[in-house]
Each structure stands twice: as structure tokens, then as C-alpha cells.
Image (cartoon, grey):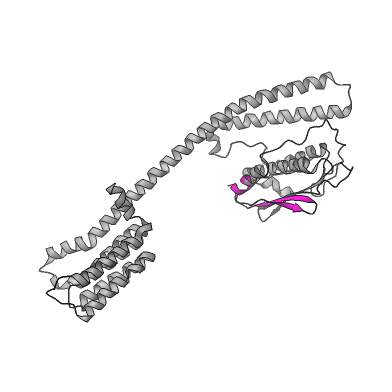
Amino acid sequence: MVTRWVSRLFDDRYAWLRLTLLFLSGVGYLLLRPVAAEPYAPVDWAFAAAALALCPVGVRWPFPGALSAALVFALAGWFGQAEPIVPQVGATWAVLELTLRVPMRQVAVGTGALLVGYVADSLNELPWGLPKWLYGVATVVGVPLLLGLNIRAGRELARQAEQRVAVEARAARTDERAAIARELHDLVAHHVASMVLRVGVARHVLRDTDSRVGEVFDDLHASGKTALTDLRRLVAVLRNPALLADGSGYVPIEPGALPEALAETVDRAVKTGLTVEATIDPEVATLDTVRGLAVLRLTQEGLANVARHAGPAARARVCVRMRDGDVHWEVSDDGGEGGTDVGGRRDVDGGGSRRGPRRPEAWPAVVEAGHGLTGMRERVELLGGSLVAGPDGSGWRLRTVLPAGAGR
């Protein structure tokens, strides 16, 4: 209990309390001290008052306060007539505050200033009083310095212990989440593999059906195989976290293949019946892995939101541009005012366009890529950006800027 109380007393937050007590003790000494052999002259009162006035300065500015207190101590020892008790105690405590609260370079300067002040006060004791002088140096200068360094070292050890506890707690949470994720992978992968197998069987059994049904089966089969590939890559990271350290972790697309992956995402949205106009800067192929994955997932989730909320007759616009290394990303829609025109179009910086077929009711909707706006915001904020979502005419617009270097 006593140790905890002392540690709190020397906390930086309570500097005002320490220096207030110091001020009151100085005032009490001046008013209630016994009759001294050397009565205070006006100059001694002036130096004592100056030392007390520096107490609030030390609360806000410990380094200037310590230098000023050492200067007052030196002047009081040089020009004063009585023993400068109040300036000496004030300068000694100022060095203690300095050691507790500022970088060591400033501590060295402040300690040197206090030593100069003590020399100015006790120069007349040398050389015959050298042992007494050395004892005074150890008391006035050494004690506050050693006490401050000891408290400072204790704080550092406590901080390191807290960091170790936090790291261990994060590691435990990570291990638990990895175990859950591996179990989830095994469960999902089993069902997805079963679905892919059944779709593959259906493709062979129903060869003579409508060509549009065959297109749906082909798309489902390709999507399922892609999902299985992504799951295998993800579980490789979960089972070997060291892959994350060298940047070779979960990468669902190969480096430089982002434009093609975005084009494929647009194609899938077109097959749901959306009209999609996409402008994709070829420079996105130079993006780092983290921002490239973020752009892909944002685009998938943005188009899924359009299909889910604006309907299959909506017109959507995707724009991904590079400006000075920053990624400017935007997905917007018209709110579903496209009427019966449910064809699709894809333009990739001057590329061709393609019309998508009408969407039969049996066609699957666009698969969600995350957890809606909440997941999108979290992904963007992790990369130093801010997702802006809101009405745009009769439709809706999502946009963000992923700053350069955010993925490194």
C-alpha cells in the first residue's frame, strides 16, 4: 500500500501536487522558522520569494524551471547574507522533477546547473573544508539525481512488464482466433468442395439444357474453385504465421494482376443483370499487396451492395484511379432507375464494352465480400483512409482514398 502510494505521488500527473507541497513547506519555513543566527536581509527574502515563485513554473516547464531555480540558488549563495535554505531546497527538488519527467540530455544540463549553484554557494569552504564540501555535493546534487533515476528505472521496468503482458494477451487471442479460423476453414471448405463437385456433375448431366443454364453452371463451378483456392491460401497462413513476417502471407491475387481481378469482379456483377461502367487505371497493377487486396475487396462489396439494395436493374459506376501514389476509389449507382435495361457494360480505360444478358430469377446474387459498410470502414481505416458513404442524387455513392505507403 505504501509503495503504491509513493509511486502515485511521483507520477507525472501529480507534479502539481508535489510542487504545491514544496511551495507550502517553503512558506511555512519562512514564517515559522526559529530565530536564526543569521537573520534574513531584504535580499534574502527576495531570493526566497523568487525560489517559491518558480514552483508553478516547474509544473508546466520542468527544464526552464530547474535552470531558473539553479540560477536563483547561485545568486543567493553569492549575494545573499543568510544561508539560502529555500533556494537550495527549491533547486534540489527541481532537479528531481527534471530527472522524473524530461529526456536525459536535459537532466544532465540541469544537474550541471545545480552543481554550479552549489559551488557558488560553498566556494568559501574550499580547500580546507573539502570533505564537508563533497558531502554537500552528494546530498544536494547526488541524492535527487539518484532518487529520480531509480524511480525512472522502476517506471521503465513496469512499462516493459505491461507491454509483455499485452503482447502475451494478444498472442493468446491470436492463437485462439487462428484455431477457430482453422476449424471454420475445414467446415466451409468441406461444404464448398461438395458444392463444386455437385455443380461439376450437373454440368455433365445437363449438357443439352438451355445455354444460359450452362453459363450459370460454368460460373458457379469457376467461383467455387476460386473460393477453394483462396481458402487453401488462407489456411496456409493460419497454420504458419511466419508467412506474415516476410509479406508472403495470404494473397488472393498474384502481384500485378489487380486490373484483371477487378475486371472479373465487374464481369460477375454484369452477369447478375447490373449495368456496370468501370474505369480502372492500369497503374493499379503497381500497387502493394495490402492496398491491392483492399481495392479488390472494396469493389466486390460495393457492387454487392448495389445489387442488394438498388436491385438488378440498377446502373453502377466503378472508378479506380492512381494520383501521386494514392488510390482514389469510388462505386456509385443510380438507385435502380434503369427500368428494364438490365444489360451490362465494362470499360477499362479505353477498353471495349460488353453487354450482359438479362438476369433470370434463378441466377445467384453477387456474393458479399465482407460485413457491409462496417467491414469496409475497418479495412479502409487500417490503411489510413476514410470511407465516405452517402446519397448521390437518387442513388448511393461510396468513395475513399488509400494513401501511398499505407500497405508497407
Q: Position of residue 305 (x, y in %)?
A: 74, 42
The percent coordinates of residue 355 (x first, y second) are: 87, 41
Count of picture labels: 0
Quarter holding residue 210: top right
Q: Is residue 265 shown in magenta?
A: no
Which corner quadrant of the image does residue 323 belong to?
Answer: bottom right
Residue at position x 63%, y 25% from top? 187
Q: Can I make out residue 115 in this image?
A: no
Q: Nearer the viewer, residue 167 or 45?
A: 45
Residue 101 location (% of width, % of height): 36, 59
> Dividing the picture into quarters, in which one does residue 12 lie?
bottom left
Left or right: 331 as drawn, with respect to 336:
left
In the displayed structure, 203 sits above or below 333; it is above
400 falls in the magenta region? yes
Q: Residue furthest left?
A: 128
In the image, 230 versus 92, the foreground residue is 92
From the top left corner, tell me how far across and down residue 1 is, in percent.
Answer: 29, 46
Question: Left or right: where does residue 300 sit relative to residue 107?
Answer: right
State the extent of the magenta-drawn residues as a range. Answer: 378-407
Between 248 and 406, the one lying in front of the other is: 406
